[in-house]
Image (cartoon, grey):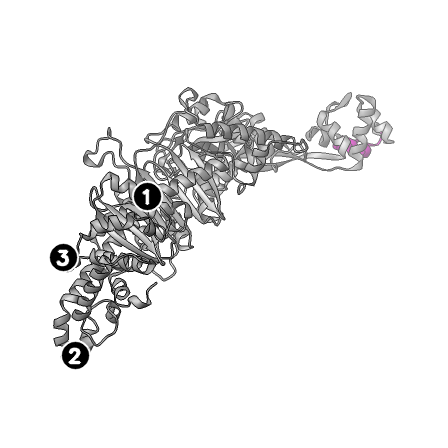
Amino acid sequence: MAKNKLYKKIGKNFSSQKQDNLKKKRSSDPQYIIEETMEMRLDSCVKKVKDLSELIIGYTPYRLNFRINTYNGITNKPSKVSSFANAVVGIILADGQSSFSHIGQVLGLNVDIDLAEHKMLEKAIKQMIDIHLLEGDDSAYNVTDQGKTFAEHGEKMEPYPSKFSLWFVPGYADYLYLRSELSEDFVNDIEDETPCEQMELSIDEIKNLAEYQATHAHSSKDRFILQEAKLEKSEEKSYNLWACFIRSVRTKQVRVLIYDDNTQSILVKLSEIVDKDENIKQQLFDSMLGNTPDVEVLDQKDVVISDEQRKAEEDLLKAEEKQASPNESSNDTDLAGLEERLHKHALYDSISFETEIHTIFQQDNADEIWLSSPWVGDDAFMHSRLPLIQTFLHQGGKVFISYSEAEGGLDKSKGKGQMIGWQSNKAINQLAKYYPGQFFYAQFAAFHSKNVIEVKNGQSILFTGSFNVLSFHVVPEHESHIRKEEMALAHYQVAENKYREFKKQFAQSYIKRAEDSFSTLTEAQILNYKNPALDYFRKDDILASLFADFDEKLDELAFSIRNRKFERSVNQSSNARVYENRDKKFSDKTSDKGDSLFTKSKESKEEQFAKVLSNAEKFVNADLVDEKAIFLKLASLCFLSIGENSQKAQLQVPWNKDLIGFLSRGDVQKVVKINVQKGREEGTTNILVLMNETIFRFFNLSLTKVEFFSLFNRKEVFPSNLKSAQPWDLSNIILNCKNNV
């Protein structure tokens, strides 16, 4: 039979144990199913037999076809013989050959006269001839090779029936270890309506196979000699395996390893045979190309290797040399540092990195995990990444996912060109909802890089390369794979820089989303604004400056809402007095701040408001004789900037013009701090003034360039623990002027 019978490509239905869909228990303590994949088991076994500088480039299913032949045989086995027979053989061996009479004479027998002694010797010699110890006639007897063995061990060979079975691959009868390498529990019958071909073997081939598979029938060690073997039946069987190809970074050579997922072992002898057979090896290699879009042909001239990957390959070779010469000293500090970084490898192939992802999520006890990939594929994300992420989040970790916007050239019709699957998109939004402050996601401008960052105890570890961590996972359902994808462990400084870059990008994205949501929020939500995601980024002092404009917009919105509530409270004050007579409790609820809006007094709120306006007008027009006067004018100008208050007051100069002239004075600038920010309305400026631990805000002022640069060519830092003065604060300052400053 042809040698290619060793290999037969199998259909798409073949795979190891399929990964179940995500199962989530509906309980207060959810558990998520994370199964060990075939690839993880494969990677673990391959690591034990490959060199450090060898990387897995692909794998494919491999169905081994073989036969089981059953035989009825005759085996000569040694047994003890009499001392008389032993003496006869010894005599003949001593002489080289001996006649019947001479043998009798040496034994002290009178075989020529004594008939009984003659018959006794005759019978003994005949028995030894029958068992092939002697040959010849009365004139001359010789000792056979078997007889010589007999003489050496003092045993004779007797025939016994023996029934036995042999496992072999047609055309590869010299592969003797098949039965010991395969597990009988997983042998499959080949369903074929055609009669099974009787595969005959020569007696020598049968003996060689039996030496390892049926020692009771033939064993040189035990001197069991198979004399004959009659074929009783021949059965065609198959066994499902995996052919895994690995490539040396050093020599660029590719070799194949045969993996049995049933026993989770590498079949060493079969691997050697397949690797030496170029025909079968090529067939398996071709099948590895598969029919999926994720499969790519490994062609070195087309491979683009990043600087990180090239450096990783160099470090890998250094590590291998160091491993081979452990006693030699090394001054390579970078390599030493590499070994300390959570015991990570310098370079990963696609299968080993799939295993590494599970290690990162399940064993490293990381604080944060960042996954960046252009695409988010439903199959990879829903079946492989989501269970890992959910479990990690449930344990208190933080996960950050970023993917790319579609490039302009992509066809977006009928869902084409989408960078995230609809199932993944739904799952990601649900994660963000259920784990605020733990799960973060962002879509950035088109990019092609693939990165994984692991953060633990302030240490950042970056894996970078070509592995699409969110859109590709190594699964047997793909049938076969050969991939160029690799992931390299980057330098610790590169990792830290990339981490800072990602964190800033995420912060900016979340700030933009928060700002866009302002228009959809209620007044109560604005006044009590909370955002756990932003709170995470606020903790980073390096990112604090990113929140200046956001905080300004939020404060402006909140200030505007409180102004409206303040005006409504004042306008309703006269009606409140009417209702107060009917229900005194009602008047206490006319403002969200209750009696804090004005000082407690027998005067009505309407009367107090009129008094505030009058005092504000007085303080604005008063001479600035001391710091108290400056403080009161500042508070008064801020109060008059609210709503229609300035129209109600009799000011000599509009409050905004007065403010500019006021803040331009040298004596004022000595006792205040001024900060300028971009206004919400186009072409406007917000002015913040700090005095006596109180911040006064003035919104949407129109300034000329001269005014702006002459007054505010500076940006001073305000203490973070200070709050802005609210309408009721301003009212109390103006009414209680004696206690101010």
- Closer to the chain start, of discs 1 and 3, is 1
303 or 195: which is nearer to us? 303
Q: Residue at x 77, y 31 (%)?
A: 152
Q: Is residue 19 visible?
A: no
180 or 390: which is nearer to us? 390
394 relative position to 49: left or right: left
Query: Which residues, given as a range, are shown in magenta?
Result: 113-124
- Which label number is shown at residue 583? 2
- Which label number is shown at residue 278? none
Q: Please check the rendered image and state whether residue 223 is part of the magenta-colored stretch, yes or no.
A: no
Residue 523, position as x, y percentages in the image: 21, 59
- Closer to the chain start, of discs 3 and 2, is 2
Cα–Cα gap, marks 1 and 3: 40 Å
Quadrant (top left/top right/bottom left/bottom right) for the C terminus? bottom left
- Which label number is shown at residue 508? 1
Residue density around tag 1, few if under 14, some if 14–19, many if 20 or more, within 10 Å = some
Cα–Cα gap, marks 3 and 2: 34 Å
- Which label number is shown at residue 647? 3
24 relative position to 282: left or right: left
676 or 516: which is nearer to us? 676
Nearest to the eye among marks 3 and 2: give it: 3
Residue 72, position as x, y percentages in the image: 54, 35
625 or 61: which is nearer to us? 625
